[in-house]
């Protein structure tokens, strides 16, 4: 994919483009917060569709967060509303992955652009309370004691070694499914957190203890006037119960569950996700 830059809010944002000129474009909003565009996934998607990705402020190759800006979820919602119309001038579908579902839904719920044809919520984070419930339910299936301890740590805002070890156990079970990657996932609990993640999510990267713990976008789902595909893995951090709840709040929902896939399985099983997404995009 080719990289260029645009400006928003006085900051330079990295933009990546590739793929065909004909047909609908796919605008991909990455996870995080503070993450980066998954360019390998973008390369595969570009084999079928015109693909556009951008690194949000503070992530990837975009300008780093300076630690002083008044940064919150609303900032990234406004960023999406400004940036996306500048990236596409043809029919397009938006893909919001994990945290990226927040700016994607904010855009979709207020957009009346006739070129906007559909929305894909890929392993979406849309509600801090529901996300917390899901993680504790998953932990409860591993160990009721660990779930009880983590619930207490979340209430107390504790992020010490004991909490991080429980987080490592959670990550091993929900991020990947291939054995070598599952073991590697444990280490993610101990990776230093970036400034954006610390600002919005808090140091407990498995369960939000910062401002995002109270965020809930489900109330605006009914305002989305285009078809929406909710897609997730059967071993995802997003549970089937929550994915179904999101669909029940949408006007034109579609639903796909990828077998033997975790939250990071767009890296392990990218074609499984792209095949499901392609069927949806081609019918928008």
Image: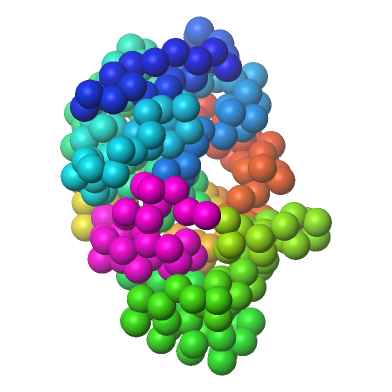
Q: Nearer the viewer, residue 185 or 44?
A: 185
User: In the displayed structure, would residue 174 be above or below residue 6?
Assistant: below
Q: Is residue 106 visible?
A: no
- Across and down, in percent, residue 47 comes to 64, 19
Q: Is residue 283 left or right of residue 269?
A: left
- Across and down, in percent, residue 53 comes to 46, 26
Q: Nearer the viewer, residue 278 or 183?
A: 183
Q: Is residue 215 left or right of residue 119?
A: left
**Residue 195, magenta (yes or no):** yes
**Residue shown at 48% from the left, 89% from the top:** 148
**Residue shown at 35% from the left, 68% from the top:** 209
**Residue shown at 66% from the left, 42% from the top:** 267
Total count of labels:
0
- Across and down, in percent, residue 84 comes to 31, 24
Res. 96 image quadrant? top left
- Across and down, in percent, residue 176 comes to 68, 57
* Residue projecting furthest to the top: 21
User: In the displayed structure, would residue 64 be above or below residue 228?
Assistant: above
User: In the displayed structure, would residue 268 be above or below residue 55?
Assistant: below
Which quadrant of the figure contains the C terminus? Answer: top left
**Residue 171, magenta (yes or no):** no
User: In the displayed structure, would residue 264 be above or below residue 245?
Assistant: above
Q: Which of 97 and 31 is in front in this view?
A: 31
Q: Is residue 97 left or right of residue 103?
A: right
Q: Nearer the viewer, residue 240 or 101?
A: 101
Q: Give the range drawn in magenta.
A: 192-218
């Amino acid at each position: 994919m080719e990289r260029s830059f645009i400006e928003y809010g006085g900051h330079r944002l990295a933009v990546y483009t590739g793929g065909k000129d004909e047909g609908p474009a796919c605008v991909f909003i990455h996870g995080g917060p503070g993450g980066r565009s998954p360019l390998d996934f973008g390369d595969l998607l570009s084999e079928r569709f015109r693909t556009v990705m951008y690194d949000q402020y503070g992530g990837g190759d975009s300008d780093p967060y300076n630690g002083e800006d008044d940064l919150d979820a609303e900032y990234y919602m406004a960023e999406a509303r400004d940036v996306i119309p500048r990236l596409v001038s043809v029919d397009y579908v938006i893909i919001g992955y994990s945290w990226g579902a927040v700016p994607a839904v904010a855009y979709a719920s207020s957009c009346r652009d006739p070129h906007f044809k559909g929305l894909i919520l890929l392993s979406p984070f849309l509600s801090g309370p529901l996300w917390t419930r899901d993680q504790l339910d998953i932990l409860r299936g591993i160990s009721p004691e660990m779930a009880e301890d983590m619930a207490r740590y979340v209430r107390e805002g504790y992020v010490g070694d004991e909490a991080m070890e429980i987080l490592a156990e959670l990550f091993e079970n929900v991020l990947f499914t291939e054995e070598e990657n599952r073991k590697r996932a444990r280490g993610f609990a101990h990776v230093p957190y970036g400034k954006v993640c610390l600002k919005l999510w808090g140091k407990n990267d498995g369960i939000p203890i910062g401002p995002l713990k109270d965020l809930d976008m489900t109330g605006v789902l009914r305002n989305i006037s285009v078809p929406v595909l909710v897609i997730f893995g059967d071993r995802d951090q997003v549970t089937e119960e929550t994915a179904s709840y999101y669909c029940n709040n949408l006007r034109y929902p579609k639903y796909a569950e990828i077998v033997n896939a975790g939250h990071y399985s767009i890296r392990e099983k990218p074609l499984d996700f792209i095949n499901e997404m392609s069927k949806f995009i081609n019918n928008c």
